[in-house]
Amino acid sequence: MLIYLILSLLYSLFGPVFFTEYGIAVLDSIDIILAFYFVGCLNYSAFRAREMIEDYFEEEIFQSWLLAVFNIWYLQYKINRLVDAEGNL
């Protein structure tokens, strides 16, 4: 993902210099497809982390709709609350 983000930055800075209108349109469509793929990976990772944390504590801690909307921010918020309540994980 990091390699893609670096290439995307270079493309957005220097793309119009090296590519035609058609080339820019193709790269923009690839950019949109990969953005949706990365968002899907982020959601999968957040729900997988939720599953592991809830298995560890053997109780339901997270609300699914909040996790779907706020992803890693909600996950980090709940982990911080668990650390404050429990002391250490």
Image (cartoon, rainbow, N blue to C red):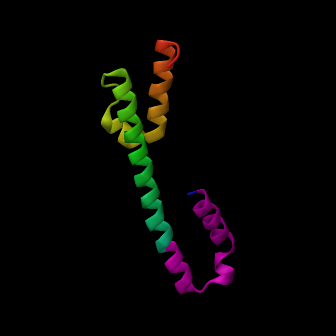
Q: Is residue 9 magenta?
A: yes
The image quadrant that residue 20 belongs to is bottom right
Image coordinates for residue 84, horizontal then vertical, percent: 51, 15
Q: Which residue is drawn at the image coordinates 37% and 21% (left, top)?
A: 57
Q: Is residue 74 above or below residue 82?
A: below
Image coordinates for residue 74, horizontal then vertical, percent: 44, 33
Q: Which residue is drawn at the image coordinates 47% and 39% (left, top)?
A: 72
Image coordinates for residue 24, horizontal then vertical, percent: 56, 79
Query: Nearest the camera: 44 or 15?
Result: 44
Query: Nearest the camera: 19 or 7?
Result: 7
Q: Which residue is drawn at the image coordinates 55% and 83% (left, top)?
A: 23
Q: Is residue 42 above or below residue 24?
A: above
- The quadrant of the picture occupied by the N terminus is bottom right
Q: Is residue 61 above or below residue 43?
A: above
Query: Nearest the camera: 69 or 40?
Result: 40
Q: Is residue 6 magenta?
A: yes
Q: Which residue is drawn at the image coordinates 52% and 13% (left, top)?
A: 87
The image quadrant that residue 62 belongs to is top left
Q: How many marks?
A: 0
- Lateral position of residue 50 relative to residue 19, left or right: left
Main secondary structure found in the magenta portion: helix
Image coordinates for residue 11, horizontal then vertical, percent: 63, 71
| Span of residues in magenta | 2-28
- Lateral position of residue 26 relative to residue 8, left or right: left
